[in-house]
Image: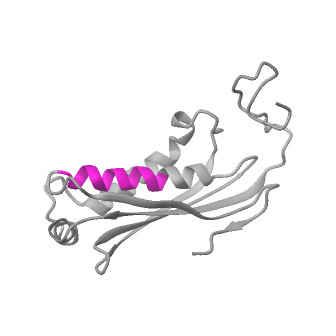
Amino acid sequence: MADFTHFNDQGRAKMVDVGEKPDTQREAVAAGRVLVNDECFNLIKSGGMKKGDVLTVAQVAGIMGAKKTSEIIPMCHPVFVNGINLELSLDEERKSVELTAYVSCDGKTGVEMEALTAVSVACLTVYDMCKAVQKDMVISDIRLLKKSGGVHGDFVRTE
């Protein structure tokens, strides 16, 4: 069990102690998409969805999700984030909502989970806002694009 950082001496789950780690600047970028049909895409684009402005509501929901990450991911440390930004765009060719989250902090642990949670919550919000029009939307490709800072170094996904 010595190689597993999230298990205690009894083999049970624990949150690792990051108290001795130095604060460093950390950033993470995550992305995802929601694939929709023509009708749904056009309603999102025109602002005609009955629940309101899909992109704005999803953007705010993603920000809220990032801030709540440690409350829903058991081994995730609470992180005081410096900034959260979500960019949402419509891809006409794919008929999709494309989402990208940028999260930064100065801390002892990274913000990958916050970026991934932001994208996930924003995708789920798009689904919720549109489900009356389309039930078979597909949430896909939620992934970490890059991270920087910390002892594990930088990561950049090559797509």
Report the coloring of the rendering. Answer: one colour
Tell me what residue is drawn at x 26 percent, y 60 percent. Answer: 54
Tell me what residue is drawn at x 75 percent, y 29 percent. Answer: 7
Q: Nearer the viewer, residue 94 or 17?
A: 94
Q: Nearer the viewer, residue 10 or 57?
A: 10
Task: Give, as a single range, the part of the protein colored magenta.
Answer: 118-131
Magenta highlight: main SS = helix
Q: Does residue 75 appear left or right of residue 92 in this picture?
A: right
Where in the figure is residue 103, as x and y percent of width and height?
58, 58
Where in the figure is residue 73, as x and y percent of width and height?
56, 37
Can you name the residue that lies furthest to the top here?
Answer: 10
Position of the N terminus, as image quadrant, is: top right
Q: Nearer the viewer, residue 22 or 75?
A: 75
Where in the figure is residue 42, as x and y percent of width and height?
17, 72
- Total labels: the figure holds 0
Quadrant in the picture for residue 98: bottom left
Where in the figure is residue 64, as x and y percent of width and height?
44, 47
Tell me what residue is drawn at x 28 percent, y 73 percent. Answer: 95
Quadrant in the picture for residue 96: bottom left
Above/below status of 25 relative to 80 = below
Q: Nearer the viewer, residue 21 or 80?
A: 21
Position of the C terminus, as image quadrant, is: bottom right
Above/below status of 54 relative to 94 = above
Can you name the residue that lies furthest to the bottom here?
Answer: 93
Is 119 one of the magenta-colored residues? yes
Is 12 one of the magenta-colored residues? no
